[in-house]
Amino acid sequence: MSNNTEWPHQAVGIQFSTTLSALGTTAFEIQQALSGVENTLSERSDLIADQTVWVGASKQVLSTEVPNGLSQADSRNLRFALTALMQIEPQIKAYTAKFDIQRLAIILGTSTSGIADNEPVLKAHFQHQSMTPVQHQKQEMGCLAQSLQQYLGWEGAAYTISTACSSSAKAMAAGQRLLNANLADAVLVGGVDTLCQLTLNGFNSLESLSNSICRPCGEQRDGINIGEAAGLFLLAKAPAPVMLLSSGESMDAWHISAPHPEGQGAAKAMQQALDRAGLKACDIGYLNLHGTATAQNDAMEIKAVRTVFEGYQVLLSSTKHKTGHCLGAAGAIEAVICQQILLDQSWLPLHQNGELDHALADQQYVRDSHLAQPIRYAMSNSFAFGGSNISLIFGTVLP
């Protein structure tokens, strides 16, 4: 068999979805946050010593109930996931009741898991101030998918993908492949990441945090804001109002924390997604940029856009000045955004309204949220450390 052989590629339906983030939880809250100029980020002084930092923090009250069987995995990350899941749990259970539980799968993305809950325990342990044992299970990457599998009582495949900022987008692509390969009848996909000191201090040591609210593709951009989010989707083969059409993936392997400066891997991922969907670049009505507001990422991404779209002025924006960079959940929250604009057909997310970098200003950034004419297809980019690139394309059938 040829190494290039792939499973037959078919679109899959987004049957149900749910989200938690700085944007809120409902479709109305998401639209209001992304189509208005009001700030949705908040300042925190408890994440980095002697420093205040802007973050995309969810204001949602989290579930206080964790089943007894999940007590060893209990963490804010898990409660975040359960709180989001509970919003669509009745619909999911009703929809999946007709399937064998061994054909119900879960693939999720995260980069932090429950490490935040172990940070004070580890600190006390290494400072010899406490003999409290460290419960490692809650911070294991596989904990998230396994815990939700146990919670739902499913017995199909269950695993977590952790490829930094591309994690949850890759989880969605993996769920589509599982359905295309007839290894599952329904797959819960998405991602969850919550704020923690580890990631904030890590990006701070890389001098990658913004001193204010981030400015994707801005003239004075100086780094990212970290955010937290959950985005969960139930995928199945049956048609739905919004379909996950395709994905394109590539790996730069250029630098441990920097993308290829010419955006070669990013362009390859976008083009592969278009090819698999059977679309041309001019078919895309909106592009959600990865748009982190770091100097290197934004420059390479716009180069990749120029390569793939070849002069076609696609409407595009980054939404990270509203959500923060949600790391392992970034692809999931931005997939929710794409789903909502395709469902609503009335608005697009505004790009940040500051001065653009003159070298990147030749694109059609969304400055007016009003959608003048319906769109059928939206693309979302997610790029991660090590050059782990993925582009997703979503589509809807217009009346």
Image (spheres, helix red, strand yellow):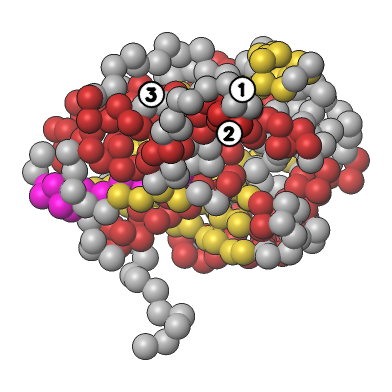
Q: In percent of the image, x 31 and y 43: which residue is there?
A: 146
Q: Are the residues flagged by discs 1 and 3 in contact, CB closer than 8 Å?
A: no
Say above or below: 292 vs 117. Answer: below
Name the residue tied to disc 1: 56
Say above or below: 30 vs 218. Answer: above
Q: Are the residues flagged by discs 2 and 3 in contact, CB closer than 8 Å?
A: no
**Whether residue 50 is visible:** yes
When asked about the image quadrant of residue 363, the answer is top right
Q: Is residue 216 left or right of residue 56?
A: right
Instruction: Give the distance between the C-alpha atoms of the residues marked 2 and 3, in whole angstroms.
Output: 16 Å
Q: Residues within 10 Å of mark 2 (few under 14, many from 20)?
A: many
Say above or below: 168 vs 350. Answer: below
Q: In percent of the image, x 73 and y 36: which residue is there?
A: 203
Name the residue tied to disc 2: 326
Say above or below: 192 vs 36. Answer: below
Q: Which residues are magenta?
A: 99-109
First-in-chain label (2 vs 1): 1
Q: In percent of the image, x 75 and y 60: which residue is there?
A: 255
Name the residue tied to disc 3: 79
Q: Is residue 313 left or right of residue 184?
A: right
* Residue 61 horizontal/vertical position (percent): 42, 11
Image quarter hosting the N terminus: bottom left
**Whether residue 218 is visible:** no
